[in-house]
Amino acid sequence: MNDVLIPAAENKNSLRLPLKPLGKVLAVTSGKGGVGKTFVSANLAAALARRGHRVLVLDADLGLANLDVVLNLHPKITLHDVFTGKARLEDAILPAPGGFSVLLAGSGMVEYSRLTTEVRDEFLRIIGSLVPRYDVVLMDTGAGISDVVLFAVSLASEVLMVATPEPTSLTDAYATIKVLVGQQLRQTVRLIVNQSTRPGSGQAITNQLQQVLDRFVATDPGHPIQLLHLGDIPVDPEVRQAIMRRQLMMQHTPDCPAGKAIAQLARTLEKTVIPKPA
Amino acid sequence: MILTLQYQFITFAVARIPDSSPFSLHSLKLDDACALLQHDAQNIEQEADEPDAAYLQRLIDGLCELSLKDPLTGLNNRRHFCSVLERSIDIVARSGESVLLLLLDIDRFKSINDSHGHLAGDQVLREIARCLARCLRPMDTIARYGGEEFAIILPNCQPVFGLAVAERIRKTVAAHTIPVSPLLSLQVTISIGGAYAPEWVRSTTDLWIERADKQLYRAKSRGRDQVCLDQPRELSVSAEEKGLLFGHLLMDEAGTRENAPSDAPKWENA
Ligand SMILES: Nc1ncnc2c1ncn2[C@@H]1O[C@H](COP(=O)(O)OP(=O)(O)OP(=O)(O)O)[C@@H](O)[C@H]1O
Ligand SMILES: [Mg+2]
């Protein structure tokens, strides 16, 4: 076992304590794949844990999950076993390096073109029983607008949209936000600009997207869509190196530029959507 | 997989045959292999100056090729098709490339067999295979999937073109006259069902085939000689929206040219 911090809630006994229905579910999603969702989820979780929050990362990318790779974990029991009734939820929750908990999807999970009622119900049940036990549940969802992704996002109280400054990534992020506004009546989406090459460009990108949304996406006049800039993460060679070393960046090199940016994201979240830890 | 097996076999075979050993090819039982290759009109004679190992390699390559082909039509067989499909779905999941799978079924094939005999049926299969192969690009993979069913994998096929491509195939086959005997020519039609691999997500080839198969069923039940495609859900962004979206890129360029103003935010402002 790694020398990890096991949050108090991981304690078997605490499961019997009265449940606190205040947890925040944040969906980390993107329009295009490969923009850094998993990297952000894992490291933001570590940054929040470091600030004293009880955090769980849920691998909701039922298909391409690679959280296990980023965290260098090789679980015997995964979400797949919980979905198929082979294991209890409690047994699939693992302590991750970085002091948070994680629920990995496992390789048995595949994308179903249609979201089956079983997947739906299991998902609901799982989220329902996680929320009271953690201060923050971060969902690392798949990219795009498949049924499973949209459903996972619909369960979240906040959407953190990860995009890079590249045109393809922005187009897909914009298209996804349109769907979230149209189908889920979302009014707020928080944008994280990852792999940014120029400080400050994230705010400009957010303003730009907001302008296009205002102009092309019709919403109820009283409830306009609001795109909020949560923060930028610079391109940083340390990100790749950490993955190559199979280490969590936030745990080993928290002072690199990307690490500092993520720590800043955690502080911003604390100021806006999640209450300070007790 | 087949390749690795082949490799293992070769390394094994070659390792056991040091040049100096009195080993002879005659001690291997190659007759069946040679007969198979000969039947496929492949040159199986050892060249005068060809080393044994090279000759053996050539035989193995020939057999591997044979194991991927459908004997009647010369197209890829189902085994090869499945391995290409497997690879495609991996590529799509990580790259977002658009890959279209088409399943094609000859309409009322049974009645051709029943009224004109199996030889005529075989001739129809061969002719359609040739006709299909002519419609495709070198990068496409075409296979005989089952009895009178064919499958085509079209990599890098944008969703806007999918229907046009499938329609072109359908029309080409319908317009083709197939001589099955000196006195008789037939015209046959095909039904086509198609589906794109889901992008950015891991799926399974079974689910992909199932989606295409459903569309094939739809094409059949709508009266045959038709194309039905499972349309991927579109992330639609108009040209006008795109134009507006990328304003910041111009600003970005201007910013780097002007040597970023001193009050610009810096990283690590923590
Ligand atoms: N800030 C960064 N600086 C440098 N490289 C980065 C940064 N963020 C992400 N990357 C690179 O991008 C790769 C993809 O990141 P990640 O796996 O987190 O993306 P993802 O959105 O989860 O992908 P998928 O859609 O496949 O799940 C990482 O392996 C890393 O090499
Ligand atoms: Mg990921």
Image (cartoon, coloured by chain):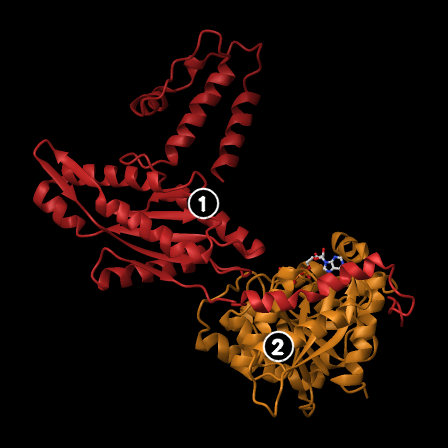
Query: Which lettered chain is shown in orange?
Result: A
Q: Position of residue A258 (x, y in %)?
A: 81, 63
Which image quadrant: the C terminus of chain B? bottom right
At label 1, which amino acid type do we have? Ser
In this rendering, the count of numbered labels is 2
Q: Position of residue A148 (x, y in %)?
A: 52, 72
Position of B108 relative to B178 (above/below): below
Q: The residue tagged with tag 2: helix, strand or loop?
A: helix
Describe residue A266's horizontal placement relative to residue A37 as left or right: right
At label 2, which amino acid type do we have? Leu
Describe residue B183's horizontal placement relative to residue A70 as left or right: left
State the CA–CA distance, disc 1 to disc 2: 43 Å
Q: Which mark is residue B83?
A: 1
Q: The residue tagged with tag 1: helix, strand or loop?
A: helix
Q: Position of residue A107 (x, y in %)?
A: 56, 60
What residue is disc 2 on?
A213
Residue A150 in view, yes or no: yes
Residue at x-position 60% and y-position 78% = A215
Instruction: Say if labels 1 and 2 share a chain.
Output: no
* The hue in which chain B appears in the rendered picture of the protein: red
